């Protein structure tokens, strides 16, 4: 079974600085997707960034970028120029490329609570 | 806004009761998944419905059941509530099964006393 581990329960960053959130995962599959989701106090999960395992190039979305190391099974999120609105819970998630049964659903880590100091 | 709405936002029940949670997806979203998020944890997959049929289930007992309707709404039913069922319940919809772009609702916070 696949697992996702986020080893940092809480992180803090100064406004305008850069912060990196860590995520490792375990799988025997070769084709899958990785995600970072943001969950603000409104509780709605918001997709921040997505990475396809077969793509070597790291995904980037504006101030958000990932460092995807497939061999090491590592998928970290870098937030540049942090803003007060970035404060939230961040979840790393894995999804198999295969569908059916219990496959194809999102498997989440326990999350990292990010605080942004003004 | 994702266009996915859930009701109610909060709910209090007592052990042994039954509960129905509702989700309204965006028009055209024929796939809906339900997740349970316990306090301090990441969401856990309960099940998925595609075109009104269950087509995937996580490690949850049969007292967790669901329905999906042609009007893009769905329900999560939980029978014989237990204290450990206290959690945030999230629904997520997508255009097609296998589409990795999920749209989440804001959840229903269920407390079982």
Image (cartoon, coloured by chain):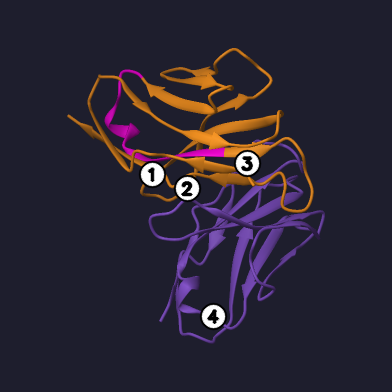
Chain colours: A orange, B purple
Q: Are marks 2 and 3 in contact (CB under 8 Å)?
A: no
Residue at 77% x, 62% y: name it. Answer: B69
Asked whether the viewer can see residue B109, the reply is: no
Tell me: residue A113, above or below residue A51.
Answer: below
Q: Which residue is mark 4?
A: B81
Question: Does A82 lie within the magenta span?
Answer: yes
Circle 4 crowding by C-alpha within 10 Å: few under 14, some 14–19, many from 20: many
Q: CA distance from mark 4 to mark 2?
A: 24 Å
Q: Name the side, left or right, on which A77 lies relative to A88.
A: right
Separation of disc 4 and disc 3 at Cα?
28 Å
Badge 4: chain ID: B
In the image, what residue occupies the spot 38% across and 44% down?
A40
SS at mark 4?
loop
Q: Residues within 10 Å of mark 3 (few under 14, many from 20)?
A: many
Direction left: furthest residue: A118
Q: Which label sits on residue A40? A: 1
> Are the residues under badges 4 and 2 in a single subunit?
no
* Residue B1 among magenta residues: no
């Amino acid at each position: 079974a696949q697992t996702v581990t986020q080893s940092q329960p809480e992180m803090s960053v100064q406004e305008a600085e850069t912060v990196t959130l860590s995520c490792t995962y375990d799988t025997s599959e070769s084709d899958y997707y990785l995600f970072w989701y943001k969950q603000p106090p409104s509780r709605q999960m918001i997709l921040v960034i997505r990475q396809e395992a077969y793509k070597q190039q790291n995904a980037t979305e504006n101030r958000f970028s990932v460092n995807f190391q497939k061999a090491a099974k590592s998928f970290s999120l870098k937030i540049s120029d942090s803003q007060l609105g970035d404060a939230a819970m961040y979840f790393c998630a894995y999804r198999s490329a295969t569908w059916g049964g219990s496959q194809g659903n999102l498997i989440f880590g326990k999350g990292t609570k990010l605080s942004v100091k003004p | 806004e994702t266009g996915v709405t859930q009701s109610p936002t909060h709910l209090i029940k007592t052990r042994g009761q039954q509960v129905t949670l509702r989700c309204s997806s965006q028009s055209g979203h024929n796939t809906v998944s339900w997740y349970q998020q316990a306090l301090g944890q990441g969401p856990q997959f309960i099940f998925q419905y595609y075109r009104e049929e269950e087509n995937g289930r996580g490690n949850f007992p049969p007292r967790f059941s669901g329905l999906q309707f042609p009007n893009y709404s769905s329900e999560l039913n939980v029978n014989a509530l237990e204290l450990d069922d206290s959690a945030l319940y999230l629904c997520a919809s997508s255009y097609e099964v296998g589409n990795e772009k999920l749209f989440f609702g804001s959840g229903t916070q269920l407390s079982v006393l």
